[in-house]
Image (tube, rainbow, N blue to C red):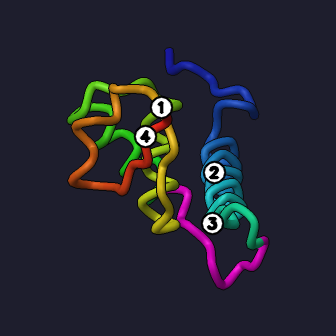
Amino acid sequence: MPHAQSPSQGPHRHAKISQCLAWQRARRESIPQAGGGNASHAISADTLADTAADFKARFKLSLADAFAAVLAKERRADLVTGDLEFKPLEKEIKVQWLK
């Protein structure tokens, strides 16, 4: 005997989930850069996350440190730190060291 689908398991549910995911992705498509708030100067959320994941893997950084490094790179800003874990990133970003 075939298994009857409840309304929450049918094709409508799949379409609603797909629609919801598409809406969420469109909504978070870009993140305004720090200090700007101008949509024309936005960093793609996917680019930000992908680059942070790359930095985390290649340089053995915490996720928070990886995001700090990515934001510094995207904004062409100096990263001001005393944390020596950023030493290997000096070829990727400009680091100003606290003394």
- Provide residue 85's location: percent of width, then percent of height: 33, 26
Gap in Å between the C-alphas at discs 2 and 4?
A: 42 Å
Instruction: Give the residue type that dot 4 points to.
Output: Trp
* Residue placed under numbered mark 1 in the picture: 99
Gap in Å between the C-alphas at discs 2 and 3?
A: 15 Å
- Provide residue 47's location: percent of width, then percent of height: 44, 59
Say which residue appears at 43% left-offset and 26% top-offset.
83
Nearer the observer, disc 3 or disc 1?
1
* Residue placed under numbered mark 3 in the picture: 30
- Provide residue 66's location: percent of width, then percent of height: 43, 38
Gap in Å between the C-alphas at discs 4 and 1?
A: 6 Å
C-beta proximity under 8 Å, tags 4 and 1: yes
* Residue placed under numbered mark 2 in the picture: 21
Please tell me which of labels 2 and 4 falls first in the chain. Answer: 2
Q: What kind of element bears circle 2?
A: helix
- Provide residue 9's location: percent of width, then percent of height: 65, 31
What span is in magenta?
Answer: 37-46
* Residue placed under numbered mark 4 in the picture: 97
Gap in Å between the C-alphas at discs 3 and 1?
A: 36 Å
The picture quadrant where one finds residue 41 is bottom right
C-beta proximity under 8 Å, tags 2 and 4: no
Please tell me which of labels 4 and 3 falls first in the chain. Answer: 3
